[in-house]
Image (cartoon, rainbow, N blue to C red):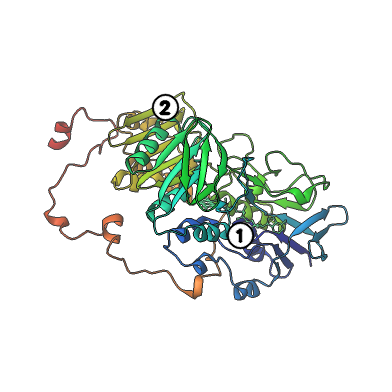
């Protein structure tokens, strides 16, 4: 029976294990992970005091027993001998393997700034980082300076804003979220943050962090910001040092093919550590997002279990709530060729849809969370891109009504196309783990109705408004619609 060894208990590693077992009940599986299994994605909710620590868990002893997984939790992989197929651990143990999955994710970087190693200066990538940030917040209304305004920086900022912290964010590039939003989307985010009392400092760098209990962050433009806590969100790098000398091809991450195979036989890689196929045909990329880690893990697991399952590629996507402003970007959002744009900085409303012929290949959406449009069609934009639906006959309609993707989504049959585009050719199985064996709530709560269509109280007495745009060919005016 083959022996599969998985390094890393994040979403890539866990999904690989579940998928191996889906196809192969008999092989042996060993998991090596220096951290216990938990979800990084939920750390902002933990930080914001919305969930207790144990809700972060993604697996239990019973879950692993049921999947018959041998565990080395708390151990680190230090070296791989790819010829002898042996993995070396930091406690001296060695594991022989038939297939090896590297799902070691990434680690947060520390900028080379004097004082960055000091007390009350933390990254926010791991559970320990989150605990350390909470520990440093010794006052009732703490102040924090975040260095770096990427996706992680602003998701952390959002959590601390909910707690009422006084916040500033420093970004060396010309605008916030430089890898998620263009200048217009970022302008909306910056104005929104400033209006809520958050200090936004762009186009400058932190040069020195000094002070013991109260920190001072000195900026390259001469300003100085005081804070109880400094949080470094300056980027991540893949965890692959233990592969030195193994001969595995590395680019921005471990280079993998559509089967998650590396350049070395029987060695696979998945998740943040892997540079894999792009759904829209772009160059292989490290997307470093949860959805890609899950897909990678499932594809790697199936192929390790002897199936031949190629991956269609992952879609770059980021969806963020910044203190009540929803921002999302997908795919080739940077491109400026054939686009449909709507922009009203006053609300703000911003949409940029990127076309390639009759297909949508990218987009940005930004606007207040209470905009119903935001709540209903962010996922549809993603689905229209993912399904690669031909929207040629709807393009004019979208150009005139970029806020209404719902009709296009339904009419183009995008949902049906997506249903058939499952990662492994079938709906995924229910996970074998639920926190404290709790089942999801099925009774709609008080907020449910307003969001998912059961009628909220007083609905019947609301004035009726005509539904705009029920025709594929846009009508000329609202008056015409009303008479219809
Ligand atoms: C605060 C925060 C919020 C996020 N929010 C989102 C979000 O909203 N949406 C989204 O898509 N993504 C989000 N992400 C990113 C997402 O969590 C990652 O993309 C995802 O966790 C990657 O999964 P992975 O399995 O590749 O790696 P990881 O989850 O990092 O798991 C890898 C594991 O391997 C272990 N490991 C590393 N090296 C070794 C070694 N040598 N030996 C043994 N074990 C090792 C690591 O310690 C870790 O436990 C967020 C991340 C953070 C930190």
Give how far apart the Cα atoms at labels 2 and 1 are: 37 Å
Where residue 131 sits, quadrant-wise, is bottom right
Q: Is residue 330 visible?
A: no
Residue at 77%, 44% in the rendered image: 263
**How far across and how far down the image is residue 193, in percent?**
37, 41
Where residue 355 sits, quadrant-wise, is top left
Residue 78 is left or right of residue 302, and the answer is: right
Question: Are discs 2 and 1 less than 8 Å apart at CB?
Answer: no
The label number, if any, that marks residue 206 in the structure image: none
Q: Residues within 10 Å of mark 1 (few under 14, many from 20)?
A: many
The residue at which mark 1 appears reads as 15
The residue at which mark 2 appears reads as 339
Q: Nearer the viewer, residue 107 or 408?
A: 107
**How far across and how far down the image is residue 363, in percent?**
44, 35
Q: Nearer the viewer, residue 405 or 202?
A: 202
Q: Nearer the viewer, residue 90 or 298?
A: 90
Q: Secondary structure at mark 1?
A: helix
């Amino acid at each position: 029976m083959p022996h599969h060894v998985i390094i890393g208990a994040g979403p890539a590693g866990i999904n690989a294990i579940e998928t191996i077992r889906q196809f192969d009940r008999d092989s042996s599986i060993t998991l090596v992970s220096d951290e216990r299994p938990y979800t990084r994605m939920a750390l902002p909710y933990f930080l914001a005091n919305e969930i207790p620590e144990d809700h972060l868990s993604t697996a239990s002893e019973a879950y692993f027993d049921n999947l018959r997984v041998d565990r080395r939790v708390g151990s680190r992989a230090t070296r791989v001998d790819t010829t002898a197929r042996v993995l070396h651990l930091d406690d001296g143990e060695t594991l022989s393997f038939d297939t090896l999955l590297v799902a070691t994710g990434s680690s947060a970087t520390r900028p080379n700034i004097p004082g960055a190693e000091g007390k009350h200066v933390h990254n926010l990538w791991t559970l320990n980082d989150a605990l350390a940030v909470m520990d440093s917040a010794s006052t009732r209304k703490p102040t924090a300076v975040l260095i770096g305004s990427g996706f992680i920086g602003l998701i952390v900022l959002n959590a601390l804003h909910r707690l009422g912290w006084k916040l500033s964010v420093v970004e060396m590039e010309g605008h916030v979220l430089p890898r998620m939003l263009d200048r217009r989307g970022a302008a909306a985010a910056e104005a929104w943050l400033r209006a809520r009392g958050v200090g936004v400092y762009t186009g400058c760098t932190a040069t020195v962090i000094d002070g013991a209990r109260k920190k001072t962050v000195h900026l390259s433009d001469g300003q100085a910001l005081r804070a109880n806590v400094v949080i470094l969100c300056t980027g991540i790098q893949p965890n692959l040092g233990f592969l030195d000398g193994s001969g595995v091809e590395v680019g921005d991450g471990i280079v993998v093919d559509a089967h998650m195979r590396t350049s070395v036989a029987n060695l696979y890689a998945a998740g943040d550590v892997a540079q894999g196929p792009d759904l829209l045909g772009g160059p292989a990329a490290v997307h470093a997002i949860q959805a890609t880690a899950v897909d990678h893990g499932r594809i790697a697991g199936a192929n390790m279990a002897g199936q031949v399952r190629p991956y269609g590629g992952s879609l770059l996507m980021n969806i963020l709530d910044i203190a009540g402003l929803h921002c999302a970007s997908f795919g080739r959002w940077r491109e400026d060729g054939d686009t449909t744009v709507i922009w009203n900085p006053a609300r703000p409303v911003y949409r940029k849809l990127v076309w390639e012929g009759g297909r949508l290949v990218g987009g940005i959406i930004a606007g207040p969370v209470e905009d119903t449009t935001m709540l209903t069609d962010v996922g549809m934009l993603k689905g229209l891109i993912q399904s690669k639906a031909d929207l040629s006959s709807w393009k004019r309609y979208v150009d005139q009504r970029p806020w209404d993707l719902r009709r296009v989504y339904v009419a183009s049959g995008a949902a049906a196309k997506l249903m058939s585009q499952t990662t492994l050719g079938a709906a995924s199985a229910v996970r074998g783990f639920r926190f404290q064996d709790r089942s999801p709530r099925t009774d709609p709560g008080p907020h449910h109705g307003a969001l998912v269509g059961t009628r909220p109280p007083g609905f019947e007495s609301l004035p009726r408004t005509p539904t705009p745009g029920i025709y594929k060919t846009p009508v000329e005016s609202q008056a015409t619609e009303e008479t219809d």
